[in-house]
Amino acid sequence: MMTMITELLNNHILSSIFTVAGTIALFQLTAVFQRKLNAIWLQPMLMCILAIIAILLWQNISFESYFSSAWLLNALLEPAVVALGFPLYQHLEAITKEWKSIVLVLLFGAFIAIVSSFIITMLLIGDYTIAVALSLKSVTTPIAIAIAGQLEGNTAITAFAIILAGFFGALVGPPWLRFIKVKSPKSQGLAIGAASHAIGTATVSNISYQHAAYSSLALIVSAVITALTSPFIINYLATLF
Amino acid sequence: MITFKQKTFNALYSIFAIFSCLALGKLCWYFAPILPSSLYGLIIFTLTLHFRLFNADYIKSSVVWCLKHMAVCFVPAGVGIMNHFELIKQFGIAIVAITFLTTLLLLTVVGLHYQRYADDEK
């Protein structure tokens, strides 16, 4: 069995098919479990990632060789994000009516996110490169990594914190928002898109179309706002410490 | 009842629409690298649907399917966490705790703020 797996992984085409099929099968399996057991914490994406990490560690397979075999799934990430334009189109009319308030809320949110993360990190850890990394964790990966590099932040920690923030918002976001009595799909979508970028958006897209639309919107607007304002905010905050 | 032929056409039509928007997005990124190409593509896709350059009726069913299953595409990137075990050991739980705390704060701020605005409107 072991040698079979090793041989399989040595052949790139076979291993790609095997890895992609395996990942999808595992994902579907956890999705079925989640529905059957009706347990929110059994989030398929998260469970699937943990299971794959466990398998890779157990079989001594490096992340790089897994990732090079799973390239197809990763390549589909970009078109999948483009597809989010559809729910956005369906709610475009409602959104254009209130774009001012949406931009204002997200501007305020991005400001709070950057300032709070930077200050708390400086006080607790006291390392500028980590503080920059954590300030940028709520926006989509390519943007955050680019800005972190530009501001001499730690890009590895940025990548890690982005995934963490994504899962946390996707997992805890909906129940927490209901708990603080934020119940409208619009507000929930906007909040999760602002805090948990594409991972959060992909997850709440399953709840309703309105969630998907507002979350996609928050994803775009927050990314633009953060790209434009964070260098100034962080440079200013850095002078305080 | 939609025929199989129609379904196939819809799927191919959607793939063509999405990938041409993504290609335009890549072009935008080449000239103005402010947003990643996928986000440019998202905006272009919305606009082409809005201005009826693509027929939304053909696209709907494929996109619904796509949105339902797109989360699986994030799995390979997420597994990348395993490369950062050293970082987690080094800085302990502080990074995780700060990320959780500030994400919760951001969710609360945006959620409550927008909800209050939406209530005022009524």
Image: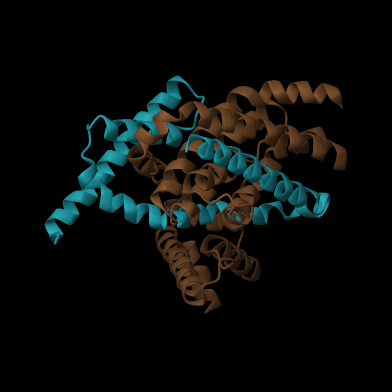
Tell whether A223 sits left or right of A72.
Answer: right
Residue at 47 percent across and 49 percent down: it is: A185
What is chain A's hue in the picture? brown
Residue A30 place in picture, x, y as percent: 50, 70
Is A8 displayed left or right of A157 in the figure? left
The picture places residue A212, in percent across and down from the top left corner, at 43, 47
* Quarter occupied by residue A60: bottom right
Is residue B7 visible in the rendered structure shown here? Answer: yes
Identify which residue, B62 or A207, lies in the foreground: A207
Q: Position of residue A100 (x, y in %)?
A: 50, 26
Which lettered chain is shown in cyan? B
Residue occupying image coordinates x 52% and y 25%? B34
The front one of A111 and B71 is: A111
Residue pictured at 43% horizontal, 59% vertical: A16
Residue B115 image position (x, y, % from top left):
55, 42
Using residue A228 as the reference point, say whether residue A26 is left or right of it: left
Tell me the quarter of the image containing the C terminus of chain A.
top right
- Along the horizontal axis of the image, is A200 left or right of A90? right
